[in-house]
Image (cartoon, grey):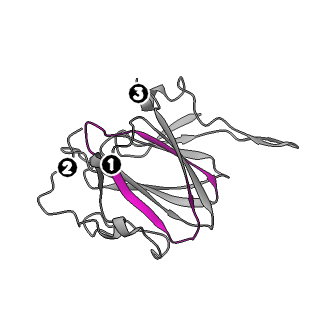
Amino acid sequence: MKLLSTGIKGLSIVETNLLSDHRGVFSRVFCERELAEAIGGRKIVQINQSLTVAPGTVRGMHFQHPPHAELKLVRCLKGRVWDVAVDLRAGSPTFLQWHAEELSCQNARMVVIPEGFAHGFQALEPNSELFYMVTAFYKPEAEGGVMPDDPRIAITWPLPITIMSERDKQRALISSDFSGIIV
C-alpha cells in the first residue's frame, strides 16, 4: 500500500497492489501498519457497502457533526465512481475546496477522508459498488450534508446528475456566513 497526498491536508489516496494470476486477483483492503499515518490511532468500527444502479446517480455530500465525526476509507469493488471529498473544516486553508478521484475495481485505489469533510460520489457505470470503512458509528441526529451542486463548492461532475435521494435534494445551499465545522 502506498499513501499519496492530494494537496488537501489529511485527505489521502491509497494505491494498492493487485496481484493477478490464472486464478484471478488478490489485493489488500486494509493494513493498520501501512495506513497508520492516515488513520492514526483511530479504529474502524463500522463497514458499509453500497450499490448504485444507474450512471449519473449522485450519493452525497454527507458528513457527521462532531463528536460523531468520522474518518472514512472508501474503495470501489465493482464498476467506476467519481468520488469527491469537500473540506468543511473551520480555519482550514483549503476550506470549501474539493478533491475528486476516479475509483474502480481496476485501479484498486482508496480515498482516506478525514473528519470535517463532506463525502459523496457519482456512479460512472451501472451497478457500481462501494466499500466504506468508518471510525464512528452512524448517528442520524449527527448527520449533515451539502448540496452536490452547491455553487460555493462548484464540483465538476463528469456526468449530468440524473438521480439523487429526496433527502439530498432538500439540502440547503451553504450560507455565506458558514465558517465550517470544528473538528
Q: How far apart in space, not on screen, are marks 1 and 2 (Cα)? A: 20 Å
Q: Nearer the viewer, residue 143 or 114?
A: 143
Mark 3: few/some/many CA within 10 Å (<14, 14-19, 20+):
some
Answer with mark 1 or mark 3, whichever residue precedes in sequence: 3
Q: Which mark is residue 140?
A: 1
Residue 19, by quadrant, is: top right
Which residue is at 61% across, 37% downward?
29
Question: What crowding class fits label 2: few (fewer than 14 Cα within 10 Å), some (14-19), or many (20 or more)?
Answer: some
User: Residue 33: percent from the left, percent from the top?
Assistant: 53, 23
Q: Secondary structure at mark 1?
A: helix
Which is nearer the N-term, disc 1 or disc 2? Answer: 1
Residue type beneath disc 1:
Pro
Callout in the foreground (1, 3): 1
> Looking at the image, which residue sits at the far left?
177
Q: Secondary structure at mark 3?
A: loop
Please name the residue that numbered disc 3 is placed on: 42
Is residue 85 found left or right of 32 in the rendered image?
Answer: left
* Circle 1 crowding by C-alpha within 10 Å: few under 14, some 14–19, many from 20: few
Look at 41% across and 34% down and name the residue there: 135
* Residue of label 2: 180
Bounds of the magenta span? Answer: 50-78
